[in-house]
Image (cartoon, rainbow, N blue to C red):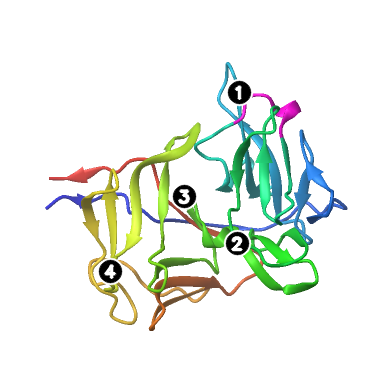
Amino acid sequence: MALPLLMLLILSTLALHPHYSSAADSLSGNQSLSGDQKLTSEGGKFVFGFFPLGNSPKRYYIGIWYNTDMVSKLTPVWVGNRDTPVLDLSSTVLKLSKDGNLVLLNQSKSLIWSTETNITANSTMAVLLDSGNLVLQDGSDTSRILWQSIDHPTDTWLPGGKLGLNKLTGENQHLTAWKSLEDPAHGLFYLEIDPSGSSQYFILWNGTKNYWSSGYWNGKIFSGVPEMTSNYIYNFQYVSNASANYFTYTVNKDDVISRYIAPQYFMHIC
């Protein structure tokens, strides 16, 4: 059986030195984002806004990226319109719609991307947190989270995020690799928890072919990943109950950047 030489999950750790800014961390009411306007998390660790990729022409995406000198290249950790880039940034706008969702509209006011959640609140506001999580809150009760980006990961798994299966809705929170280094569209490799409910993860090629399995979780490591060891700055946890199966992790040091990403390809030995 082919064994991956590169694990799907790549851990990056760096000391965090954020750029502090007086920029707003939230969007509400009639406010909107366009052009080079951005939200910056309260502690300056992350930025949410538009960023370009590619050349001739450039393609623009709405997303979240690190805001620190330790990450010299713009490094997105979440992308909203990953499959539907915009070409004309000057006439593209992100705002809160009448139904409370965040929406991305092009020059003809056509919908490009939306949070697409059922909202019963009278008003909403979007806030970028220092965890890299963009949350949509009830405007009259900010403790009530209506939608959050960390529940809809793209190719990156941030601390506090969950990768797993919602047994009530059938939704499988998974990572999907970028198509290429310059194209965040859905690529060929997926990482998802076993949809049948077991504690193992699968790498799927093209969404269907089982490329690799982690083996079952034994309470400390996955049986198929013997090199996985505990590290004092990380807390890994597997949760299984009546409503969900998921794996999550936290970092004990606030000044460390940590993320897992899904690469676009894998080398293997046959």
Q: Which comes before the other along the chain, label 3 or label 2?
A: 2
Q: Give the residue number, with chain letter if any, for mark 1.
A: 58
Tell me the kind of residue under disc 1.
Answer: Lys
User: Do residues under tags 3 and 4 come within 8 Å of each other at their CB atoms?
Assistant: no
Q: Which range is magenta?
A: 86-92
Label 1 crowd bin: few (<14), some (14–19), many (20+), radius 10 Å: some
Q: What element carries label 2?
A: loop
Amino acid carrying mark 4 in the image: Gln
Q: Where is residue 57 in the image (x, y as percent from the top left)?
A: 59, 18
Query: Mark 2 or 1 closer to N-term?
Result: 1
Residue where numbered disc 2 is placed: 118
Q: Provide residue 140's location: percent of width, then percent of height.
A: 80, 71
Q: In this view, does 199 lie to the left or right of 31?
A: left
Q: What residue type is labelled 2?
A: Asn
| CA–CA distance in space, label 1 to label 3 | 21 Å
**Residue count near mark 4 (Cα–Cα under 10 Å), binned few <14, some 14–19, many ≥20:** many
| SS for callout 3 | loop
Mark yes or no: residue 70 visible: no
Of the residues under marks 3 and 4, which one precedes in the sequence? Answer: 3
Q: Could you tell me residue 110's position as x and y percent?
A: 64, 34
> Left or right of 121: which side holds 58?
left
The mark found on residue 200 in the picture is 4
Q: Mark 2 and mark 4: span between their CA atoms?
A: 31 Å
Q: Is mark 4 on a helix, strand or loop?
A: loop
Which label sits on residue 155? 3
Point 41% across, 72% down: residue: 246
